[in-house]
Amino acid sequence: MFEFFFKYPLTVFRKGDFVLASGWPLWLLIVLVLGAGGGLAWHLMKHQGWIEGKKPLLVWGMQFGSVALVLFLLWRPAISIQSLRSQQNVVAVVLDTSRSMALGGGEGEGEKTRLQRAWDALDSGVVDELKEKFRVRLYAFAGGLHRLESLEKLPDAGNATRIGESVAAVLRESASLPLGAVVVLSDGADNAAAFDRGLMAEIRKRNVPVHTVGVGREEIPGDLELAEVTVPPRALPNSQLNAQVAIRHSGEEEQTTRLTVRDGSTILASKPITLRRGQNLHSESIDFNAGDAGIRYLQFAVEPVGDEEITGNNSLSRVIDVPRGRRKILYVEGEPRWEYKFIRRAVFKDASVQLVSMLRTSPNKFYRQGVDTPQELEKGFPTTESELFAYDALIIGSVEAGFFTGEQQEMIKQFVNRRGGTLLLLGGRNSLGDGGWGASKVAEVLPIAVSDDSDRTFFREPVEVVLTGQGRDSLVCRFDEDEAKNLEKWKELPAIADYQRVGELKPAAVPLVNARVDGKDIPLLVLQNYGRGKAIVLATGGTWRWKMGLPHDDTRHHVFWQQLLRSLVANSPGPVSISTNRRLYADDPTVKLRAEIRTKEFEFANNATVTALVTPESGDPETVEMHPSTEEAGVYEAQWTAARPGAYRVETTAHQGGEPLGSEVIHFRREDGLAEDFHPAQNRELLERLAEQTGGRYWTLDEIADLPQEIRFSEAGITSREIMDLWDMPFFFLLLLGLRGGEWLLRRRWGVI
Amino acid sequence: MTKTRSRTVGVMLTLCLLLSTSFAQRFGAPRFGGFGASEIPSDWFAPDAQGEFHFARLVYSGWGGGRRRGGSWATDYPDAEYHFTQGLRRLTSIDSARGGKTFRADDDDLFNYPWLYAVEVGRWDISEEDGERLREYLLRGGFLVVDDFHGTYQWAAFLAGIRKVFPDRPIIEIGEGDPLLHVLYDLDQRSQIPGISYVYSGATYQRDGYKPYWRGIYDDEGRLMVAINFNMDLGDAWEHADTPEYPEKMTALAYRFGINYVIYSMTH
């Protein structure tokens, strides 16, 4: 339609420059137009009286418009545009042959697959027409880029769609050729997760327009897809974990299905879920146990609903490292008390937590438990950062602030801030406000304001505890996966033996449990992040009543403390901290390694030697040198190619001045044949963005016949400037006809003809 | 002859009765004068006394119960508590409440006091219900110290009661390396701690309990639940802490054992 009125496609007007091609001076046109306007006005005024009111002005407008338009057309308006010279340029036609292109047969797609439809579209004369004007290079991409010699044989489907990488590869390959344009036929389901801004900038830099042709449905009704599963990369043995699962669905109607977490053939957790109508993205939370030490290859899956067409996207894998060894927690207690005993009992058999404690039994005597050697803590609380920072978490019980020197208080603060450890302060007669902690250097770290006035804050009165909203969601406070049952189990707990009043919550504080005192709720268990670590206040020393007040086989006291203590150390970083940009590489071999290296005092280690030993499931290990990041202090990076599918173990070791700083192990997995099951609908947004950013255009398959004509307007390759006349554009003739005809009709209506 | 013999027997019986009454008054019932009498401040046993640790005493039925005020469970009461908790407050960091508590096994409040002392358990009579309650108390994390019973006969009586609590758990000699003996004081001196009768008789033993035994019942994790002082009388040693005739050395040792029992129960 556009071309019917305006003679040329819209692209011509977008890319070209408007010119007056007659060569006559513009000022003359303006003078003549103004002169014509004045003459017509003089003529109407001379013959006034035949019409009245504002009608002469309307007639003048129409007559002036007609004369001005004719004069304008005499000056030969045209579009000056650069176009590719015939047979001197190359056009690359890139066809997506990934597995998602084998889909089809659904609503709106006919019986043929996407690949067949794209193939047919090219074969229906488009390629031949392109060949008449350009040298055409045919490519197929699915994971990698392959040159096609002809359209005679349909290529095999590949495992992944990497549009960005493929276009960049075409541009690189054609760097020495006069490449005029790139045409990409794809469903846009890019699953390389690497089409980032850098890649887009690389494509834009070549200034070659990329025309994208969208294939396939933009929505697949009834399809369920696990869009994302978020789990921690590491977990302590037998710790309770929570996964956040995002499920994409059409949202047309309410659907029920079941979410399951499996480790091999073992079901770790399973729950029914309801996907509500009108929500395209459903978020679900599921708890499961990390199990014994080792590597967990977890499978998250939702059951297919009805006769779901694509079921490959109903499950996602995740890798979790459950390292052996116990994380060390230092517990300093100022007086023998029942809480101390029952905390120790709670983690007595915990394979993931080592509770090292020093208990002040008499004013000058300490009783140590859980130490590795007789020398550990022999001289009391650590006096050096390296000694203190060897622990992953620190618990301070009923100990007055004055017990610690100023340097030790600063160390405790840095333990949280710089080392990334967790500090847990318990209530007690020597704790918090009553222990003078409000005036200590540690006060800044705490999630609550600590009163430093002389009023007593610790009370030996039994009080009930109440879960807060955040507490209901917290794994620390989880006795039962079912929220209602969990709440009931909290309500059944016996009153705690004592409580301590704390000040106002700080802005970032998260209260998990409150104590109900005289009908009012006051904070009892509060946490906040501080620096790299976390600080928690549990303003009581009386949870032991949960053990003594319930049947001996009731596990709630122990479960609470196990979960709390594990949460203290679960994310505690070591001096060497290795991560990969993903844990599961679906049809993607590029692995980016990132290591954060610190000294024993947890200062940035910027001159360390960092190596990663990558060991595949089968095959020889390979040592990868890691290099300092130019952007972040203490960070070392490397890129590595996982050539084959399977599991890989990465052990990163850091040395500084010949001294070992530490090492850490992480696992990842590469799996092929998965990526194409995800995002099966056409990603029109990506295709449009690619075209728009490069100066190309997004096409549907129905429009592709016009592509050979339009593709020639490009500034890339070998071009010449072309003048495209506009004077004979139908729009102008219709406008002129309208002006003259309109005047005639008006005159007729007024009866002055 | 028969008359003379009858008169002699009558005089002897009267003398025995007078002697035994006198002895009982001196050493048996607490707070009735004699060596054990201390001036305890009136507010010492305030019911609302607060603290982390409370000296809790088990009230039980037993065949000695009718002879003494309060029964045999109340032996040394309250002087033992009075002296011992003072020592506990002075020698340790424990926030020990003044005074003490007494509980029957069927008292629900017992579970709020995880340290329990039972005296003269050679005379106790534990019912099946009491046994079940004490078993539950100990399995939840409570700690029981039994004391002041001597000889073969009383051991058998104690055993009959404790088997209602733990029918199958073995009673084990506490080894030298057990943390109980080192948690605050290193108690490598296994001296027999005698009762007050030692002051008169010079014998550290009673009945046929010549040799002291420190025995225990452990839980599945190897933690001591019941500390058994057999052929000893720590209670008397605490009660007579300020009795000049009672050896200070024995009182000091009894304090050390008692303190170790308390700290062990708060750490294991």
Image (cartoon, grey):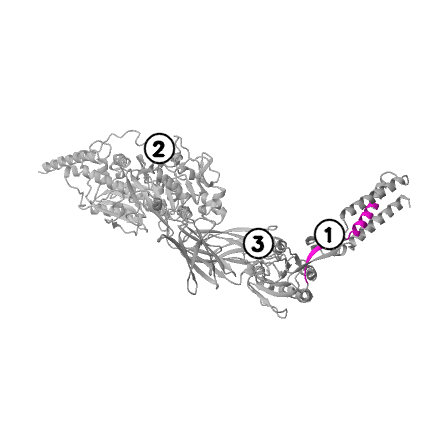
Residue B195 position in % (x across, y down): 20, 39
x and y, in percent, of residue A171 in the image: 58, 60
Given residues A348 and A504, the one toward you in this image is A504
Provide the residue designation for mark 2: B48
Q: Using the rendered image of the protein, determine whether residue A655 is visible from the camera's viewpoint.
A: yes
A317 lies left or right of A294: right
Q: Give how far apart the Cα atoms at labels 3 and 2 are.
A: 77 Å
Rendered-image quadrant of the N terminus of chain A: bottom right
Element type where label 2 sits in the image: loop
Residue B7: in magenta span: no
Q: Are marks 2 and 1 in contact (CB under 8 Å)?
A: no
Mark 1: which amino acid? Val
Decide whether residue A76 is among the magenta residues.
yes
Determine the chain carrying the residue at label 1. A
Q: Is residue A68 left or right of residue A751?
A: left
> Which numbered circle lies on residue A19?
1
Q: Earlier in the sequence, mark 3 or mark 1?
A: 1
Task: Assign a secondary structure to mark 3.
Answer: helix
Amino acid identity at mark 3: Ala
Tell me which corner region of the image, top left, top right, bottom left or bottom right, holds residue A365: top left
Question: CA gap, disc 3 to disc 1?
Answer: 32 Å
Considering every residue shown, the one lying at the far bottom of the view is A152
Label disc, if present, on residue A201 of the rendered structure: 3
Badge 2 amino acid: Asp
* Residue range corresponding to the magenta coloring: A63-85
Label 3 Cα crowd, 10 Å radius (few <14 / some 14-19 / many 20+): few
